[in-house]
Structure formats: C-alpha cells, structure tokens
Amino acid sequence: MRHTYATEMLRSGVSFPTVMKLLGHGSPDMTMLYLDTALTGL
C-alpha cells in the first residue's frame, strides 16, 4: 500500500520533498525508487 500511495502522489504532482517527508524516508535514494516506478508507468 505504501508503494501505491507514494506512486499516486508523485503522479498527481505532489513534490518530491513532500513525498519523502510523508513516507518518513531519511534518504532521497529510497524515495527515488518510487519516483522511478512512477515515471516508467506514464
């Protein structure tokens, strides 16, 4: 569910730093995994 939530937020235009903070990621690298998935699905 977290993965779907993050992907949908990114696809909807929520900013990267906001998604990172909402998911509690300490490293941008972890959030980038979600971003890569969101971009390939477009």
Image (cartoon, grey):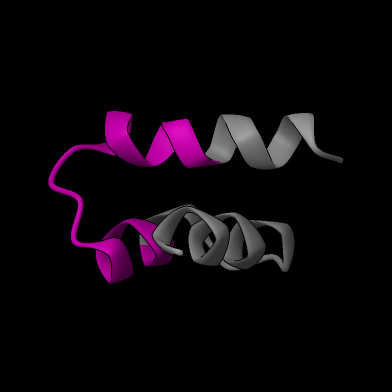
Q: Going by the image, does 33 lie left or right of 37? A: left
Q: Going by the image, does 33 lie left or right of 30? A: right
Percent across and percent down for residue 20 are 33, 56
Who is closer to the viewer here, 20 or 2?
2
Residue lying farthest to the front in this orientation:
1
Determine the image quadrant of residue 28. Answer: top left
Q: Is residue 28 magenta?
A: yes
Percent across and percent down for residue 26 are 13, 46
Percent across and percent down for residue 16 are 47, 53
Residue at the image point whose x is 65% and y is 64% from the top: 8
Who is closer to the viewer here, 42 or 13?
42
Residue at the image point whose x is 53% and y is 62% from the top: 15
Who is closer to the viewer here, 8 or 13?
8
Q: Is residue 22 magenta?
A: yes
Q: Quadrant of the C terminus?
A: top right
Q: Write the start and end of the magenta stretch as one range.
A: 18-34
